[in-house]
């Protein structure tokens, strides 16, 4: 069957509309619908056209006026009614878009909604998560402005309460934290000011890192390996305090709502683990995993076992960027891009995830080269960490200090020694 026009093509082959529409902005869809009655009827009656909506680039969803509590001058200039609250003011643009889509009877078609970097107050998100006329399954609010995170946490905990109605919440995935897509090698290239990394020795290492990074990029491997699944170091950009504040929310939402972050499952989070000493101070409550590792240098794994991307339960896998455009399935959102592997590998599509929180990697992980030692092969509590480590081969070295593997965030074997030597040779802090 021949299709002479675009309308014929979209009308006769719904798969074409399904594939194309996620790449069109909301403005483009509305403009296309306004061209003729036929296009308007086609788009507003199709569930595929508005299934994926990205408002992050929609100028109508942004609030460009400065905050209203800075003297109130701009507030009065807008001639807003005295009863209007600040929440109403900042939610006005996004509510206007939703109101228009509701009048066109397509609001219920939206399953994947992107609100990154636009004004999205917590009350608007509460409506999206809890009210019946929304059917959003995956929501992204990375960098959203005017968002009260405490209220959002309360909304999520309320949505997953044990007494909730069957089939609720409809929301299954939330992108909030945002993943640093750039490898940790980039962070090593930028020199620190007035520190040992300004020395010639450190700059030589940075040059080697730069060459390695260029080779990785040119080979195309970096584009196929998500930061969670490579030794990329610190993956999340938020502060430890902010992440710890969210940890209990992720715990409450476990197996109901999934996030673009995961909880750490190190032995210190398990009160029954034999690796946790009797001292209760060594036990940790819920923490969000922030550091992507490559496994222990000795056993090449971790005590809690590596997470296989195709076999692990959904609660152990983070949502990955970018958002799925053609599906609202959590499974699809959690699966990393396939890498080039041997066809003889029984798990050829598997990628291993090693991730821990900052507390579970303290004095075990080298921030320079990324080496990590697990609890089975490195017992920190038996070492005198307060003593200054001796460089390998020194006549004053003793058995206790020679067992140290990580000091000041750097491995003794390589990175710390290099910094000590480069610092002394350049009249630095060790000169």
Image (tube, rainbow, N blue to C red):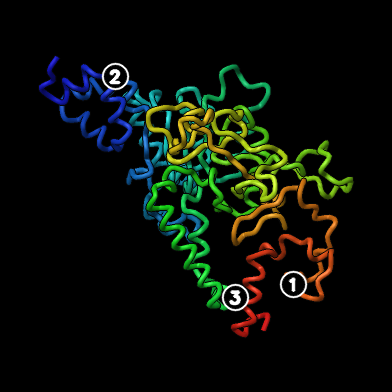
Marks 2 and 1, the one that precedes in the sequence: 2
Give the farthest residue toward the right. 278
Instruction: Check if mark 2's residue and mark 1's residue have beta carbons within 8 Å.
Output: no
Give the class, few, some or many, for how many residues have Cα within 10 Å of label 1's Cα (few <14, many ≥20). Answer: few
Q: Nearer the viewer, mark 2 or mark 3?
A: 3
Q: Which residue is depicted at the point 41% across and 27% down? A: 327
Name the image quarter holding residue 168.
Answer: top right
- What residue sits 68% from the left and 64% below the top? 413
Q: CA distance from mark 2 to mark 1?
A: 76 Å
In screen coordinates, is 6 left or right of 72? Answer: left
The residue carrying mark 2 is 45
Image quadrant where residue 328 sits: top left
Of all residues, the one furthest to the top in this rendering is: 1
Q: Where the N terminus falls, by quadrant?
A: top left
Residue 51 has which mark? none
Q: Nearer the viewer, residue 74 or 90?
A: 90
The reply to whether residue 300 is visible in this rendering is: yes
The CA span between labels 2 and 3 is 64 Å
Kind of element beneath mark 2: loop
Q: Quadrant of the C terminus?
A: bottom right
SS category of the residue bearing label 3: helix
Q: Which residue is mark 1?
A: 393
* Distance of label 1 from label 3 (alpha carbons): 22 Å
* Mark 2 / mark 3, whichever is N-terminal: 2
Q: Is residue 127 visible?
A: no
**Label 3 CA crowd tier, 10 Å (few <14, some 14–19, many 20+):** many
Give the vertical position of 117 relative to 114 (above or below). below
Residue 417 versus residue 292: which sits nearer the camera? 417
- In depth, the one of 180 and 312 nearer the eye is 312
Marks 1 and 3, the one that precedes in the sequence: 3
For mark 3, what is the residue? 196
Mark 2 touches mark 3? (CB < 8 Å):
no
């Amino acid at each position: 069957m021949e299709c002479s026009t675009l309308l014929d093509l979209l009308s006769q082959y719904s798969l074409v509309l399904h594939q194309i529409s996620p790449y069109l902005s909301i403005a483009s869809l509305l403009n296309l619908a306004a061209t003729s009655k036929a296009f308007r009827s086609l788009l507003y009656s199709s569930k595929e056209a508005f299934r994926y909506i990205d408002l992050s680039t929609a100028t109508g969803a942004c609030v460009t006026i400065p905050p209203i509590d800075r003297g109130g001058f701009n507030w009065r200039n807008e001639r807003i009614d005295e009863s209007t609250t600040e929440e109403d003011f900042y939610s006005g643009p996004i509510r206007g878009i939703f109101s228009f889509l509701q009048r066109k009877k397509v609001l219920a078609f939206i399953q994947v909604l992107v609100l990154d970097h636009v004004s999205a107050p917590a009350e608007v998100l509460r409506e999206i998560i809890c009210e019946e006329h929304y059917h959003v399954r995956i929501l992204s609010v990375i960098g959203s402005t005017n968002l009260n995170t405490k209220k959002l946490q309360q909304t999520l905990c309320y949505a997953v309460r044990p007494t909730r109605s069957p089939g609720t919440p409809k929301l299954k995935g939330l992108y909030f934290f945002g993943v640093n897509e750039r490898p940790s090698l980039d962070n090593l290239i930028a020199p620190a000011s007035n520190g040992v990394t300004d020395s010639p020795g450190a700059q030589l290492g940075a040059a080697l890192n730069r060459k390695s990074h260029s080779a990785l990029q040119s080979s195309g491997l970096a584009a196929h390996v998500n930061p969670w699944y490579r030794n990329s170091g610190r993956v999340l950009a938020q502060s430890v305090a902010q992440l710890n504040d969210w940890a209990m929310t992720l715990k409450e939402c476990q197996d109901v709502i999934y996030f673009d972050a995961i909880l750490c499952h190190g032995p210190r989070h398990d009160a029954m683990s034999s690796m946790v000493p009797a001292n209760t101070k060594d036990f940790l409550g819920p923490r969000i995993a922030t550091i992507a590792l490559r496994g222990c240098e000795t056993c090449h794994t971790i005590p809690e076992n590596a997470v296989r991307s195709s076999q692990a339960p959904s609660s152990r896998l983070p949502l990955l960027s970018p958002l799925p455009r053609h599906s609202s399935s959590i499974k699809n959102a959690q699966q990393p891009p396939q890498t080039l592997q041997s066809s003889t590998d029984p798990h050829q599509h598997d990628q291993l995830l090693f991730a821990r929180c900052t507390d579970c990697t303290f004095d075990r992980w080298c921030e320079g080269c990324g080496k990590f030692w697990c609890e089975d092969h490195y017992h920190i509590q038996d070492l005198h960490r307060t003593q200054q480590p001796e460089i390998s081969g020194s006549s004053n070295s003793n058995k206790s200090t020679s067992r140290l593997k990580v000091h000041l965030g750097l491995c003794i074997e390589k990175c710390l020694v290099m910094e000590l030597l480069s610092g002394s040779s350049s009249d630095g802090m060790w000169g």
